[in-house]
Image (cartoon, rainbow, N blue to C red):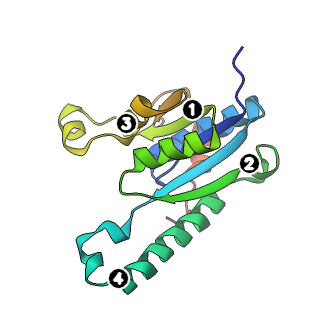
Amino acid sequence: MIVLHSVLVATDFGPASDAALIYARDLARTFEAQLHVLHVADNARATPAAAFYPDTFHDVQTQLEESARHRLGRLLTMDDRSVSRAIVAVRRSSVPADAIVAYAKEQRVGLIVVGTHGRRAVSHLLLGSVAERVVRTAPCPVLVARVAQYDAVAPDAVSEVARPGRAE
């Protein structure tokens, strides 16, 4: 029997992440597990321009992380907060996959759920894949969810996450 005590979903606030959130939310409820919702913010200080404008990039970084926390909070439902005891987290990194795996290790999560765009070979080679790197390095099982192009995710669930007027 599989027992999950916590489920981590990583989000970049895109459509693939919305699909991943649907799975993570349902798995957390089914297993009565705690839901962790993580966003990895770009490390603005790692850009070449940061060396020339250190004060500006500190403010930029702070704004990026505050905005991400606000958006994460808006993703959560009342059930996420009460039933799944949801936690939102923001980490800063230039390598999102490494930050996701590090968070999973720190929190000892039982399952990571990530979205993927399902790119083809050439774009995958050029762009890499956060999901693939997480799968290869994670300390626990990883569920990779694609944008709802099949019947496993009900249309109502997708429209709930991707409802009109949702601020990006």
Task: Name the element at disc 3.
Answer: helix
Q: Earlier in the sequence, mark 4 or mark 2?
A: 4
**How far apart in space, not on screen, are marks 4 and 2 (Cα)?**
38 Å
Disc 2 target residue: 80
Quadrant in the rendering for residue 119: top left
Number of residues whose C-alpha sits closer than 10 Å to that of mark 4, classed few (under 14), some (14–19) or many (20 or more)? few
Task: Name the element at disc 1.
Answer: loop
Quadrant in the rendering for residue 141: top right
Q: Is residue 10 left or right of residue 88?
A: left
Task: Name the element at disc 4.
Answer: helix
Q: Earlier in the sequence, mark 4 or mark 3?
A: 4
Which residue is painted at 30% across and 84% down in the image?
A: 53
Residue 92 visible to an observer of this rendering: yes
In the rendered structure, which amino acid carries the disc numbered 1?
Val
Q: Is residue 46 above or below residue 13?
A: below
Residue extending furthest right? 82
Residue 156 visible to an observer of this rendering: no
Q: Which mark is residue 133?
A: 3
Find out whether the residues at labels 1 and 2 contact each other: C-beta distance under 8 Å. no
**How far apart in space, not on screen, are marks 1 and 4 (Cα)?**
45 Å
Give the x, y percent position of residue 144. Answer: 47, 32
In the rendered structure, which amino acid carries the disc numbered 4?
Pro
Which is in the foreground here, disc 3 or disc 2?
Answer: 3
Quadrant in the rendering for residue 55: bottom left
Quadrant (top left, top right, bottom left, bottom right) of the N terminus: top right
Q: Is residue 5 left or right of residue 38?
A: right
Give the x, y percent position of residue 75. Answer: 63, 56
Q: Earlier in the sequence, mark 3 or mark 2?
A: 2
**How far apart in space, not on screen, are marks 3 and 2 (Cα)?**
27 Å
Number of residues whose C-alpha sits closer than 10 Å to that of mark 2, classed few (under 14), some (14–19) or many (20 or more)? some
Which is in the foreground here, disc 1 or disc 4?
Answer: 4
